Amino acid sequence: MERILINKKYIELDSEGYLKCINDWNPYVGHELADKEGRKLLYEHWEIILLLRKFYYKYKISPTMVPLINELKHLNYKKGNSIYLLKLFTSKTLESPARIAARISGLPKPKNCI
């Protein structure tokens, strides 16, 4: 079992780096999860993270790429495409940007997401 230390508290992660308890998430945890992947979170990342968390609390599910892109289109039509997400959440292992963003957002892995 993996865990991270934030403000003198250990937070448990599953084998893929997702939080075991989504209630453990806060912005400090988000930064730490991003740091573990070698990412520095910018305003654009936080925009996606907050959108994902809002989506999750509304629908009780982490969005895959298509619903995430559709939500982004409502936010800003220029950002509502997969290329934008790929630029923000790139992966050497070709992991889906929706999965990476969900992990950093402290949400469960999206179902049916490559």
Image (cartoon, rainbow, N blue to C red):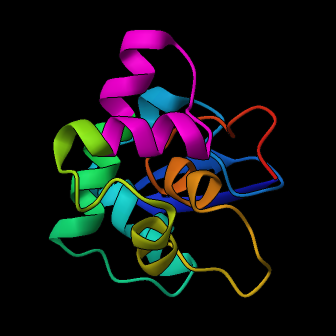
Count of numbered labels shown in the rendering: 0
Residue 9 position within the rendered picture, expressed as x and y whole percent measured from the top left: 43, 50
Assess whether residue 70 is covered by the magenta stretch: yes
Quadrant of res 21:
top right
| 19 sits left or right of 88 in the view | right
Q: Nearer the viewer, residue 21 or 95?
A: 95
Whether residue 7 is visible here, answered yes or no, is no
Give me the residue at 46% from left, 41% from top: 68
| 31 sits left or right of 59 in the view | left
Assess whether residue 12 is covered by the magenta stretch: no
Q: Main secondary structure of the magenta part?
A: helix
Above or below, 84 against 80 in this view is below
Give me the residue at 74% from left, 68% from top: 95
Residue 8 position within the rendered picture, expressed as x and y whole percent measured from the top left: 38, 57
Quadrant of res 51:
top left
| 2 sits left or right of 79 in the view | right
Residue 7 position within the rendered picture, expressed as x and y whole percent measured from the top left: 31, 57
Quadrant of res 66:
top right
Give me the residue at 42% from left, 68% from top: 32
Residue 36 position within the rendered picture, expressed as x and y whole percent measured from the top left: 55, 78
Q: Nearer the viewer, residue 32 or 56?
A: 56
Whether residue 88 is visible here, answered yes or no, is yes
Give me the residue at 37% from left, 12% from top: 58
Q: Nearer the viewer, residue 97 or 46?
A: 97
Above or below, 45 against 105 in this view is below
> What range is drawn magenta here?
53-72
Which residue in the rendered view is the most extreme toward the top? Answer: 59
| 98 sits left or right of 35 in the view | right
